Amino acid sequence: METPLHSLVADIVAMLDPSLREDYEERAAIMEYEANLERAHAECLALIDLLRRHPSILIDVTILQVELAGAIQYWLTTDLDSARQYLADIGGVERGIPDLAAVIKQQYGNIAVLTTFK
C-alpha cells in the first residue's frame, strides 16, 4: 500500500508493529476496492477499526499473553521488543496480544493489581 495520504493517519500507522500494520493495510485495501471508497476515506475507516480493536495503540501500552513454565500469564509493557526478547531469553512463548479491557474483566474480575516483574 502507498504511504497514507493524511499526516495524522501516517503518524499513527508509523507506530504500528508489523502485524498491526499488515492488518491496517489489508483492511484499508478491502474498504477501498470492495466498498469502492476513496483511498483517504478507506484509510481513515481502517484506522478507526484498528483503534477500536486495539486501543492500546494510542497509549503505547501492550498486553501480551505468554506461556511460561506451562502457565499462562499476562504482561503489560511499554517496550514490546524488550518484552519479547526477555520472554525468549527465559524460555517463554508469546501466545498473542489480547484486548486489555477484556483480559482485566475476564481474568481479573475487573480489577488487576500490577507488580514489578524484573
Image (cartoon, helix red, strand yellow):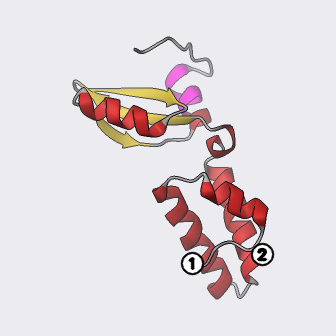
Please name which of the two marks, 1 or 2, marks the residue nearer to the observer. 1
Q: Is residue 56 above or below residue 75?
A: below
Q: Which residue is mark 2?
A: 41
Q: Which residue is mark 1?
A: 1
| Quarter of the C terminus within the rendering | top left
Would you identify the image quadrant in which residue 105 lies?
A: top right
Question: What's the magenta region?
Answer: 103-108
Is 39 magenta? The answer is no
- Density class for disc 1 (Cα within 10 Å; few <14, some 14-19, many ≥20) is few
Residues 92 and 80: in front is: 80
Name which residue lies at 70% across and 57% down. Answer: 11
SS of the residue under disc 2: helix
* Residue 11 visible within the image: yes
| Residue 59 locus on image (x, y percent) | 68, 37
SS of the residue under disc 1: loop
Is 105 magenta? The answer is yes
| Residue 63 locus on image (x, y percent) | 51, 34
Name which residue lies at 41% across and 34% down. Answer: 82
Question: Looking at the rendered structure, which numbered label has been put on residue 108?
Answer: none
* Residue 92 visible within the image: no
Q: Is residue 40 above or below residue 9?
A: below
* Amino acid type shown at disc 2: His
| Residue 26 locus on image (x, y percent) | 54, 72
N-terminal label among 1 and 2 = 1
Q: CA distance from mark 1 to mark 2?
A: 14 Å
Name which residue lies at 70% across and 71% down. Answer: 43
Name which residue lies at 51% across and 30% down. Answer: 77
Q: Is residue 30 above or below residue 10?
A: below
- 43 relative to 87 in the view: left or right: right
* Amino acid type shown at disc 1: Met
Would you identify the image quadrant in which residue 56 lies?
A: top right
| Residue 46 locus on image (x, y percent) | 67, 66
